Amino acid sequence: MAIEPGCGERPIFEGGAQYSRIIEGVEAGIGEFPWLVSIQTGSEHFCGGAILNKWWILTAAHCFPFEEISPAELSTVVGTNDLTSPYKEIKGVSKIILHKDFQKVNMDNDVALLLVDSPITFSDRIIPICLPRQPVPSTWHECWVAGWGQTNTGDKNSMTTDLMKVPMVIMNWEECSKTFSKLTKNMLCAGYKNESYDACQGDSGGPLVCTPGTDKKWYQVGIISWGRSCGLKNIPGIYTLLAKYDVWIKNVTELEGRPYNAEEMRSPPKLKNIRSQASEFPERSSPGFWFLLCLLPYMLFRSIFNS
């Protein structure tokens, strides 16, 4: 009987050929980011996410700015680099949970969880990401971000259906705070000196993953959150610091009856498809639904701030 891959492993990518825009990026290899998820509405990608376990996807709170967005209108694509692939697996969403202290003004606590409507089946192409070890290594050996967002700054038509990746280096927080006055201790900065490597609109919610270099496991260190434009040389992007939210993830998933990292799960509460503090979503035939769908490409992307 085959042994199921553990979190943060990449059996296809590590064992086979490694193929080579996110800004200044290259195409990701098959199986290189098996935890990465495309979050969609109306079959259109608008944010990224990462698989935590068979029930939960981790993403950014700012991906859901409209109270009208209902879980029933969301879908998540797992197990593929190519969003046009006929072999992609699609999961519905039964609940959206935003961090109760998420601040739209400065993007503090920019973290959210999606509860899928049926368990994700793991394979060598669908694998959950590991959460950071405690204590978090002071220096990660290698870090990457990947996504289906814009590959050219300011060009919404540069969104890609093929997964792209760029290398990242975690920057000194104190130095970064001199550039970004809105920076909080719940955030980290990552970029690449003297390069234009960056995430951009449409990459929001995706994971910043790193490996300590002592093994082949990968850990999610951050969530793509915000920045100043995209791909500006020597200007890092800002990420939610995931190490600050392990207790929140544990508490929320237990409360919902699908505890993270638990072998046995009790039945979830008998709740309707809801989102925290959400109002009813417009019917598909209503003008409100189509107006919202038209707004999504412009508003449900990586937030851009001037600090």
Image (cartoon, rainbow, N blue to C red):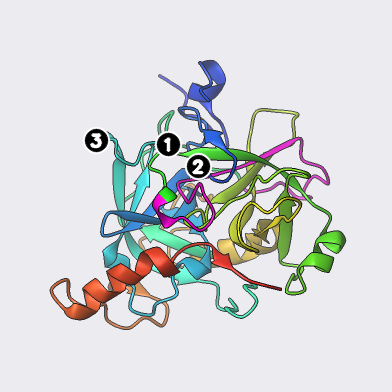
Q: Is 87 left or right of 186, judged from the image as shown?
A: left
Residue 270 visible in rendering: no
Residue at left offset 33%, top offset 78%: 68
Image coordinates of residue 268 in percent, x first then y, are: 36, 64
Residue at left offset 56%, top offset 21%: 14
Q: Which residue is mark 2?
A: 128
Residue type pointed to by label 2: Pro
Q: Which residues are magenta?
A: 131-157
- The label shown at residue 126 is 1
* Magenta stretch, main secondary structure class: loop
* Closer to viewer: mark 2 or mark 3: 3
Q: Is residue 214 above or below residue 177?
A: above
Q: Is 230 left or right of 295, judged from the image as shown?
A: right
Residue most toward the right? 174
- Pick whichever, 92 or 46, lies toward us: 46
Q: Earlier in the sequence, mark 2 or mark 3?
A: 3
Q: Is residue 138 magenta?
A: yes
Q: Quadrant of the N terminus?
A: top left
Image coordinates of residue 121 in percent, x first then y, are: 36, 39
Q: Is residue 307 above or below residue 87?
A: below
Image quadrant where residue 271 sits: bottom left
- Pick whichever, 232 or 246, lies toward us: 232
